[in-house]
Amino acid sequence: MVPFSTIRAKLVGVAKTNYIELGEGKRAEQISIVYEDRSVIAIDKPAGWMLVPFSWQKTTRNLQAAITSSIAAGSFWARSRNLKFLQFIHRLDADTTGILLFGKSPGAVRTFGDLFESRKMEKTYLAVVEGVPKKTEWTCELKLAPNASEIGKMKVDAQNGKDAETFLKVLKSHDGTTLIEAHPRTGRTHQIRVHLAQSGYPISNDPLYGSGTKLPKKEQALLQFPIGLRAVSLAYVDPFDRRRVKIEAPRESFLQEFGFKF
């Protein structure tokens, strides 16, 4: 088997930026591009940006709406790439930071979406949890379903829930918290968060499933109190040219935020 190769953003020429820029003036925000090719762009999503329907206007942090508006306005980052279209292929929770993949065409969105649906996309997260697990690794297969009594949350539902599988591996512990590598083999909403909480080790600063004090529910709170969950790697065989690709996001700041050395 050919080993995965880590591929950084391919930015041809000095004219292209290595970030996307949303908003204008003092409110403008630059989000790093960690990988790019002819079909996709992967960004390092900050906390607080939501992946909700384009028409949902209850937040100013609608990531897809902001990107679409930026492209339509002819922002330099998009114009320099001759981009007319960019749409997310999978989702990250608003609270979660890290790699988020976008397709440059409807065909790319469908084709790469199939990789996620068929479980051919290898996803790696880092999670900082409360407590120290007795096991060094385990697989959680609790079925998940929306929690009708608490809108926006998921629950374990052995009878009506959808299959969910997460492989969890302990990396190191520090001061009552533990750094875990998580590999979700399915893509259910809040899957890693619920599986870790149900295992007895809720993610640090998780306002929905954590065991400690609840964080404020304002959007800005996500920026001030990031939860201990970060998407750090995507690995796959490119469906168009059959290359093996591994995209990685920086880890150092996340680890230092929670007291772990890089």
Image (cartoon, rainbow, N blue to C red):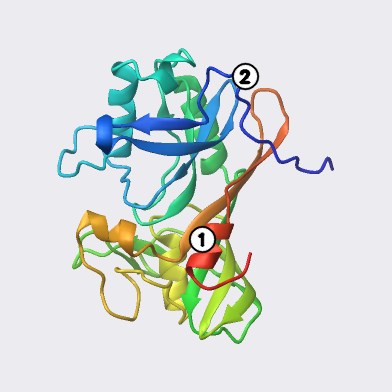
**Disc 2 residue type (three-letter):** Val
> Can you tell which quarter of the image residue 168 is in?
bottom right
* CA distance for labels 1 and 2: 29 Å
Is residue 167 placed above or below 50 in the rendered structure? below
Q: Which callout, 1 or 2, points at the residue further toward the start of the chain?
A: 2
> Element at badge 1?
helix
Please state the horizontal and vertical placement of residue 193, each as a whole percent of the image.
42, 66
Question: In the drawing, what numbered circle is on residue 145?
Answer: none
Viewed as shown, does residue 182 lie left or right of 78? right
In the picture, which quadrant includes the N terminus?
top right
* Residue appearing at x 41%, y 55% in the figure: 96
- Label 2 Cα crowd, 10 Å radius (few <14 / some 14-19 / many 20+): few
Please state the horizontal and vertical placement of residue 10, each as a whole percent of the image.
63, 26
> Can you tell which quarter of the image residue 172 is in?
bottom right
Viewed as shown, does residue 141 lie left or right of 222? right
From the image, tell me which residue sits under label 2. 12
Q: Nearer the viewer, residue 98 or 262?
A: 262
Is residue 19 placed above or below 221 in the rendered structure? above
> Element at badge 2?
loop
* Residue appearing at x 36%, y 57% in the figure: 95
In the picture, which quadrant includes the C terminus?
bottom right
Query: Can the viewer see residue 184?
Result: no
Q: Nearer the viewer, residue 101 or 190?
A: 101
* Residue appearing at x 81%, y 43% in the figure: 3
Question: In the drawing, what numbered circle is on residue 254?
Answer: 1
Viewed as shown, does residue 59 lie left or right of 7? left
**Disc 1 residue type (three-letter):** Phe
Please state the horizontal and vertical placement of residue 222, each as a whole percent of the image.
31, 58
